[in-house]
Image (cartoon, rainbow, N blue to C red):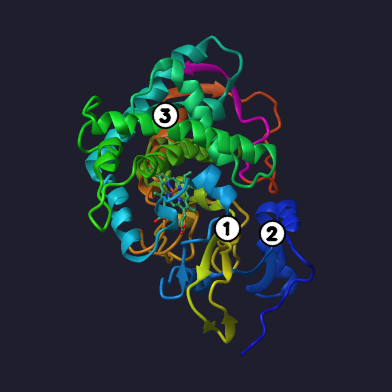
Amino acid sequence: TKQIPKEKGLDQTLTLLNEGYRYISNRRRHQQSDIIQTRLLAQKTILISGEEAAQLFYDERYFKRKGMAPRRIKKSLFGEHGVQGLDDEAHKHRKLMFLSLMTPERLEEIKKITMKHWKKKVHEWKGRNRVVLFDEAEDVMCRSACAWAGIPLREKEVEQRAREFGEMIDAFGGVGERNRRGKRARDSSEKWIQTIVKQIRAKKLNPPENTAAYIMSFHRDHKGKRLDTHTAAVEIINVLRPIVAIGRYVVFGALAVHDHPETLPELRVGDDMYTTMFVQEIRRYYPFTPLLGALARKDFHWKGYPFKKGTLVMLDVHGINHRSDLWEAPDAFKPERFKDWKGSPFAFVPQGGGDHYMGHRCAGEWITVMLMQTSLEFLTNHITYTVPDQDLSYSMVRMPTIPKSRFVIRDVDTK
Ligand code: HEM
């Protein structure tokens, strides 16, 4: 048995909040190790990084999710009793429900819906001398998500609902007021969606049978029991909220185009291969998910290091996407690296690693990639705009992060 290198100090929660996305990389460098013991949120925590570490993290024989998420995350970002905290049979059954939404036909549909909503914006933008792309992206994604999921959304509600989804996302690395705002947003959003679930069950509202609203309202769990209205609402929000989150990647995409104008000609050709590489590089390069947590299911040894049952283990998501043993020149933005990329599902983990069906890897990766492509196509092929002077830098400490100016554009015109 080897001893896990240990960070000094009683609790490093403040260090995590002070160092943000670089926290685990900093500990790795400090300890010269890919496995480090520390204390976070007043409990013993093991940090792990690297491809093999991701493989271990996604091995369900050793880890479970139930009881992992702290209360403050469940009350804001995730919701209670949702898929993120399930294990084994209950998880696989619920996960299949999400994955059943991701058929090629349904993906094509959300792509069309999203393009339509982007195009509708142009007219309104033309006369403005300041368009905040981040706000517009969340608005477009919220409209698209609701339309696709079978959730009615009145025009006068859009602003509030989009803001609420945004606030749930914005809460994850926040303490105090930012977290409270996320909780209030979740309460309000859950109330709204629960009312809709009740209307659907009473046949007062009849969304198409292939929508998330319908499927989740009538879903039965692995024991044949219908989800309670609250859980159904939580799962519908688990589709709506992360589609709104794609707005953040759209802004990073616009930033990438702005910072790397040499990519524009290729993006404008609309070559699918190139836009896919570009989108993958956005997901690798820009910070979004900093880390993921799971609990050791039992006592075991890995590479000679002891893990005790119940210990919180955190995977270095942002760090793995920037490791020099996995990526050449990891801190350079180079879409070409994804040409013929045959990397492992444990090396490129912006939305989790491993297998979508067997594990907790993000159910929305296809939608994310597709809507990023659609949005980039809109920005580069359908409109022209200028980017006035502004502070486009983004913090590596605040989680989640976004360019400080939220990406302002002006002089918008159709191409
Ligand atoms: C899970 C990131 C978009 C639905 C996850 C996980 C991450 C993630 C890191 C956790 C993986 C794990 O626990 O091992 C993102 C990012 C997105 C995005 C950065 C885009 C900005 C989406 C979209 C949807 C979605 C568009 C659905 C339409 C889900 C669901 C889970 C999940 C249902 C839970 C999976 C499970 O626990 O089995 N996502 N996601 N996500 N995501 Fe996404």
> Measuring 46% from the left and 75% from the top, which residue is drawn there?
62
**Helix, strand or loop status at disc 3:** helix
Looking at the image, tell me whether mark 2 or mark 3 is earlier in sequence order.
Answer: 2
Q: Earlier in the sequence, mark 1 or mark 2?
A: 2
* Label 2 neighbour load within 10 Å: few <14, some 14-19, many 20+: many
Disc 3 marks which residue? 192
Q: Is residue 309 left or right of residue 214?
A: right
Residue type for callout 3: Trp
Residue 13 belongs to the span the image colors magenta: no
Q: Provide residue 40's location: percent of width, then percent of height.
A: 68, 62
Residue 257 visible, this angle? no
In percent of the image, x 44 and y 68: which residue is there?
58
Q: Position of residue 300 (x, y in %)?
A: 51, 83
User: Bounds of the magenta span?
Assistant: 400-415
Visible residue check, residue 76: yes
Q: Circle 1 is placed at which residue position?
A: 291
Name the residue that disc number 2 marks: 23
Direction bottom: furthest residue: 1
